[in-house]
Amino acid sequence: MMKTDEKLIIKGKRIDGRKPEDVRKMKMEVGVIPNAEGSALVSFGKTTALASVYGPRPLHPRHLQESDTGLLRYKYDMATFSVDERKRPGPSRREIEISKVSREALEPALFLKKFPRTVVDVFVEILQADGSTRVTAINAASLALADAGVPMRDLVVGLSGGMLDGKIVIDLMGKEDNYCDADIPIAYLPSKKEITLLQMDGRLTPEETKKIVRDVLHASKKVYEKQVEALKKKYSE
Ligand code: CDP
């Protein structure tokens, strides 16, 4: 983690005016890409992710098909223009890793065994990056899967937390991510009370780690409510 002389928490407020436990302003909308089976546009502050879902559809080449289950494929991609310093096009190691852990974060929510020999493709494009992109992407993907009508146990909710200037903060923005002591992205499946993604960058005591996880799960209720609201909005119009 980098060091800075700049104070990132002043009089209990973060640089964008939030309290430590506040989530940034969220925007969520489903059904934004007509050609996809399901889609969603999700932003947390300036971080914006667009997800589209295709399938379940027959998997080709056929030798990759599984006779007893369908497969999930997940592609996380950062647009070249999403960050200050142009991101090289094509998958980086970072994007390959994020794609893998995000797929594993969503799989427990899906009934893929109902669709043998098929694949469900999830493509997530980060249009603008300002911290916590992988969890923003997971929220968008989860909504797009629901919008596509893929049978699910529940929505998967994503949110990050961390330690900044000795304080626990929720939903880190880019600058906080750069200079925090530690950050923990989490994905959670509420109906099973199951954490499906948990990563950590930085150093924390076991007690601090537990407290951050608890606080993130608590704040994730607001994210879940916003997801449900976005889905209801489409189907009430
Ligand atoms: O985005 P997330 O927190 O899930 O993953 P990260 O690898 O910890 O990246 C943290 C932040 O660094 C991103 O959200 C971006 O704001 C920024 N970043 C960047 O500016 N350029 C990159 N090539 C990758 C990340």
Image: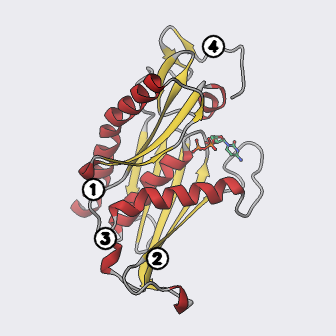
Q: Which mark is residue 233?
A: 1
Q: Which residue is mark 4?
A: 7
Q: Which mark is residue 115?
A: none
Point out the tag, 1 or 4, that comes first from the N-terminus.
4
Side (left or right) of 211 relative to 51: left
Work out which residue is located at the far top of the displayed protein and give it.
11
Point out the tag, 3 or 2, that comes first from the N-terminus.
2
Q: How many marks?
A: 4
Is the residue indicated by label 1 positioned so its CB lies within 8 Å of ligand 1? no
Q: Secondary structure at mark 3?
A: loop
Ligand 1 falls in quadrant: top right
Q: Which residue is mark 3?
A: 111
Residue type, label 4: Lys
Point out the tag, 2 or 1, that comes first from the N-terminus.
2
Q: Crowdedness of circle 1 by 10 Å Cα count: few (<14), some, many (20+)?
A: few
Residue type, label 2: Asn
Q: Which mark is residue 35?
A: 2
Residue 83 lies, in percent from the top left, at 69, 45
- Residue nearest the viewer, comparing 60 with 234: 60
Side (left or right) of 206 relative to 115: right
